[in-house]
Image: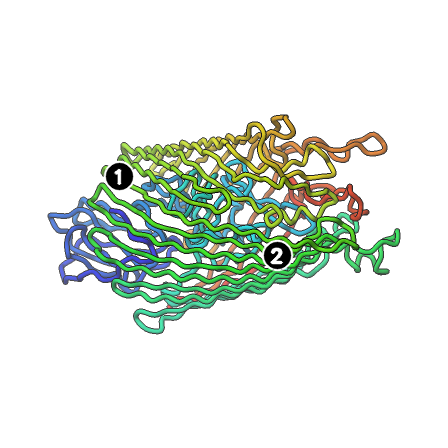
Amino acid sequence: MKRFIAYSLLTSVCAIPLYAQVKGKVTDISGIPLISANVYWAHTTQGTSTDSEGKFSIEKPDKSSLLVVSFIGYENDTIPVRRKDEDLSVTLKSGMLLDEVQVVERRMGTVKSRSSVLNEDMISSSELARAACCNLGESFTTNPSVDVSYSDAATGAKQIKLLGLSGTYVQMLTENIPNYRGAASPFALGYIPGPWMESIQVSKGSSSVKNGYESITGQINVEFKKPQAPTSVNANLYANTQLKYEANFDANVHLNRRLSTALLAHYENGNKAHDRNGDGFLDMPKIRQYNFQNRWAWMGDHYVFQASVKALDEHRSGGQDSHLHPTGNNPDGQELYTIDIRTRRYEAFIKQAYIYNKEKNTNLALILAGSLHKQDAGYGYRQYNVDQRNGYASLMFETSFNRRNSLSAGLSLNYDDYDQHYNLQNRKDRKPIRSQESETVPGGYIQYTYNWNDKLMLMGGLRADYSNRYGMFFTPRAHLKFAPNDAFHLRVSIGKGYRTNHVLAENSYLLASGRQMVIDPNLAQEEAWNYGVSASAYLPIAGKTLTLNTEYYYTRFLQQLVTDLDTDPHAVYFGNLNGESFSHTFQVEATYPFFRGFTLTAAYRLTDARTTYNGQLLERPLTSKYKGLLTASYQTPLGLWQLDVTLQLNGGGRMPTPYQLADGNPSWDSRYRPYQLLNAQLTRWFRHWSIYLGGENITNFKQQHPIINASNPWSPNFDSTLIWGPVEGAMYYIGVRFNWNK
């Protein structure tokens, strides 16, 4: 059955007192019981609700064998039931939009969608706890598909890489709303605290057209903790050997049967200066952050409403530090080179939905969202100040004609405005330049899904959008899933994606470099095709299931913004693609529970990403050729102790073209070598709290001299952006979690 828009799932199903025979328990992907979830037989009026422990029992009628489970804020699940005495365990996926039916497999906190037509993984809160996740950027330690690395060592900017390409080609969503665009993107991975997240959904390749046209290599959607979930209070305290401290708190309360609210708070302080390699430059910037979110939910029988407001204040400071130079000056008498980035960000959204017909899953939803991002940044004498305003609206309609055919259609509007003041010259006498750019994009989509008994699924969608900068453009996407039995699933996808460039906003961290920024004034809209095929096998071995996944993706650009670091080692050129640009990725992954409490996962990925630079087709710089991952998790029989270990093997890659020093040697090596990382964490669980300690990069590997010419940051040879590996050595941490659920 086609699921409702997730946050607008119906809550009223007629409950008839029967002598139930089919039993089960309903939870979210974190294992938290869902109270008052609706359980009913498809095409009947026979239903019930889960109790305070998430349990239910219901008699099986003769005329229906499909059991539907729904809960507001979560996507429906439809389960085939053959026997009248089955005992079911049902896990509902949280989200906003409805896609196909989800049958999931729990794997060490990661949920692999088995019925979805998309190649999709869900990272649960339990998986985030395994990584001692402090923010979104630290959430993918155990994920073989997503890489997170520093963009530069001076500002601490991070980027995601998916399918061998930078994070700008991944559509970032929060609760299925496009977010963290433009000026927010260099530091956005640090704006979402780990304890706030209920789950992360990673969709590879071309995704659904519902959320827009910007997904080229995939989508990453973050779901926050919901106010309508069972009442709870949670706290998390964290400290590490780099003298970074964090405090997190969240709580929700049900004001009445329909209305609930939640408060989420985060404080981060990493204001200790570190210079382990003694180059006179901070290894990483000092960071202080305050982050708050307030959420509201009204859950009616047919009408639901959700709203949220969020505010962030962050200060980053780096460069040379007075503690390293007590005189306040460098030895040569020059001023200290400092980096100072102050950010204030405000977000809000409203979601409303009305359910017209629960049997046909007919729903109408309206989403309104907006953000204001204010950033004042100084890099020596260089400056980039920006006020970015974003507005987003989406009207969506969904219905199912019958069990096999369903339709989704909608309209959307996105508005971006950038008010920029910048100085790209590292000179004190230059006055800032002001520029303003904006883009308004109205559009619409239609998407059709055909489902033949979950054995063959076809989903096709088409978007039409109009940009006031680039005119009309169309986004076609198609997906196929073939599952002749429970042991083998095959998926094929093809789709197109587009992206508008905001060069200064998205690449402001490059100002922490002596390179001159040269930007083509006539940049085209980026345009690319993505093709993907994946296969999954579930093989019974010794009474357990061996899970195998293989996948291949090919991304080919028709138009692309090329960031050229090769033509001139003292400049970075931004221009349109003149030649070929593509990425091939192949990945294989295996998971097997060897014995009770112990699970092992191994994965390996090959990447071939090439772009034409100044007439030469070259490997994309700072992109590893391969990645290997081995993760092991063991939990004692009573669940009191848990040990998690992750070994990561990262392949070598190409560096941008170096220049020649006065002694005839190159300024840096033309390639970087492979390296290994080891992370481990031990957790002791108690009834309402837990204590955990662990280490990251235990092998203590770090890139030697990550900052080029750090002794003279005012020179054109200075560069902090050529980062290919860890810039910090081994780090150890300890934390305490408190959890109370009503």
Please state if 563 lies on the left or on the right of 531 as rendered. right
Question: What amino acid is found at the position of numbered circle 1 in the picture?
Answer: Tyr
Q: Name the outermost residue toward the bottom.
A: 255
> In x, y percent, where is residue 443?
40, 47
Is residue 127 at least partly visible in the picture? no
Q: Name the outermost residue toward the left.
A: 62
Question: What amino acid is found at the position of numbered circle 2 in the picture?
Answer: Val
Task: Provide the secondary structure element on which disc 2 rests.
Answer: strand
Q: Which mark is residue 629?
A: none
> In x, y percent, where is residue 115?
32, 41
> Residue 40 versus residue 675: which sits nearer the camera?
40
> Residue 585 versus residue 91: which sits nearer the camera?
585
> In x, y percent, where is residue 374?
59, 60
Quarter location, residue 515:
top right
> Residue 194 versus residue 292: which sits nearer the camera?
292
Comparing labels 1 and 2, the label whose residue is closer to the camera? 2
- Residues under labels 1 and 2: Cα distance? 46 Å
Please state if 709 lies on the left or on the right of 559 as rendered. right
Q: Which mark is residue 450?
A: 1
- The earlier-in-sequence mark between 1 and 2 is 2
Q: Are marks 1 and 2 in contact (CB under 8 Å)?
A: no
User: The C terminus lies in which quarter of the figure?
Assistant: bottom left
Q: Which mark is residue 386?
A: 2
Please state if 692 lies on the left or on the right of 462 as rendered. right
> In x, y percent, where is residue 431?
74, 55
Q: Which residue is pictured at 60% across the width and 50% down the height?
A: 505
